[in-house]
Image (spheres, rainbow, N blue to C red):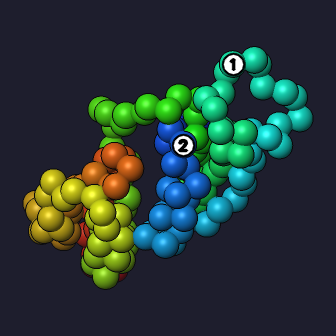
Amino acid sequence: MANVQVQPYLFFAGRCEEAIEFYIEAIGAELQLLMRFNESPEPMPEAMLPDDFDNKIMHASIKVGDSVVMMSDGVDVQNQFGGVSLSISCYSQEQAHEMFDGLAQGGEVQMPLTPTFWSPLFGSLTDKFGVSWMVGCEPESDN
């Protein structure tokens, strides 16, 4: 299927703005769009939002390299990520270390960056929001 993209959409249960700031600092993400619930052109249905969610983020998108990650505070104050990891492919070991170290701040490392048979460096972690990440380094080209 031509012209089709699959993009992650993450829900942060009220911590989206904090997550955006973290990803900008940790991995150099660029904010592309941010819209709060109180900026919606149509009113939200009665009792849809938890108390104090009017100023929370209805939709945002950040750009990381060539990829777009969409996100929201959602409409649920409890959220868990599971069964999915976001994977970052870096083109230098220095970049892999920067991305990994940035994401690991306040998170939990499952596998430190280490050489593997498929990558000069590979590691996995869960960031402080519960999002699972895999960071790898592309093998150097002989060209």
In this rendering, position of residue 65 left or right of residue 113: right
Q: Amino acid at mark 2?
A: Gly
Q: Secondary structure at mark 2?
A: loop
- Residue at left offset 36%, top offset 36%: 81
Residue 142 x, y percent position in the rendering: 27, 78
Kind of residue sitting beneath label 1: Ala
Count of numbered circles on the image? 2
SS for dot 1: loop
Left or right: residue 84 compared with residue 110? right
Residue 131 in view (yes/no):
yes
Disc 1 residue crowd, few under 14, some 14–19, many 20+, Cα 10 Å: few
Q: Toward the viewer: 116 or 97?
A: 97
- Provide residue 136's location: percent of width, then percent of height: 28, 62
Residue 7 quadrant: top right
Picture quadrant of residue 82: top left
Judging by the rendered image, the residue that carries numbered circle 2 is 14
**127 to 59, vertically: above or below:** below
- Which residue corresponds to the image point at 34% horizontal and 76% vertical from the top-left? 98
| Quarter of the picture holding the N terminus | top right
Query: What's the CA distance linking mark 1 and mark 2?
Result: 16 Å
Q: Is residue 124 above or below residue 80?
A: below
Residue at figure coordinates x 34%, y 55% from the top left = 128
Q: Which residue is under mark 1?
A: 47
Q: Residue at x 30, y 63 (%)?
A: 106
